[in-house]
Image (cartoon, grey):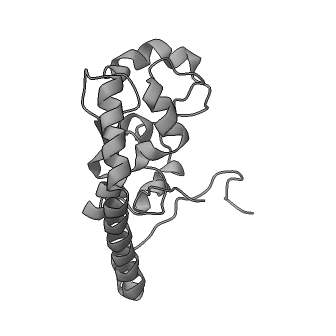
Amino acid sequence: MSTEVIGIEKPVVIDRKQNLREHRLYWVGRRTQDVVLSALALVVLSPVMLATAIAIVVDDPSAGPIFSQERIGRDGKPFRFYKFRSMCPNAEAKLDDLLDQNEMDGPVFKIKDDPRITRVGKFIRKTSIDELPQLWNILKGDMSIVGPRPALPREVEQYGDYEKQRLYVTPGLSCYW
């Protein structure tokens, strides 16, 4: 007779030190790729980033063009996450009033036609320009080019054992395509 419960998955246990030893060349190559590509992208895209920053300030001068927020990275380590500001400056404070309109299941919040999004914000979100400051997070080592999106602390608090496996890897800019 089996004592295994159907439908419940056991968490994956990864020995990081052994993984690093066995795949050292891969991890060095991946980090080198992240640094070179993010630095190159920051240089090449700097005119677009400057124009975006100016457009955000002109559209809504009540706050700066960069939005930073605490996110949770690999091994549950918090870090500062950067994006171009696409919402009004007090968007976090207005979130509680909108929670009942959430269209997503689980810990993620998303609604169509979010009233907190600015005019420029709609465009930079649609074109993903708002994500460009995360290249700095990649350069710093908080993120990688490819990996799961970094979660908010309030989302991680709701994770079960299965979802916590996302914290085994470095979060990424492009998610998994």
Q: Which residue lies furthest to the top in this view?
A: 97
- Residue 29, percent from left and from top: 39, 82
Q: In this view, does 131 lie to the left or right of 113?
A: left
Q: Is residue 64 left or right of residue 91?
A: left
Q: Residue at x 34, y 73 (%)?
A: 36
Q: Which residue is drawn at 54% across and 52% down?
A: 162
Q: Which of 29 and 124 is in front in this view?
A: 124
When the figure is inspected, residue 122 is found, relative to residue 148, above or below; the finding is: above
Q: Is residue 128 left or right of residue 83?
A: right
**Quadrant location of residue 65?**
top left
Q: Which residue is drawn at 32% across and 19% down?
A: 90
Q: Which residue is drawn at 71% across and 62% down?
A: 2
- Residue 70, percent from left and from top: 29, 40
Q: Nearer the viewer, residue 70 or 133?
A: 133
The quadrant in which the C terminus is found is bottom right
Q: Is residue 164 left or right of residue 68?
A: right
When the figure is inspected, residue 34 is found, relative to residue 46, above or below; the finding is: below
**Quadrant location of residue 26?**
bottom left
- Residue 119, percent from left and from top: 46, 24
Q: Is residue 83 visible?
A: no
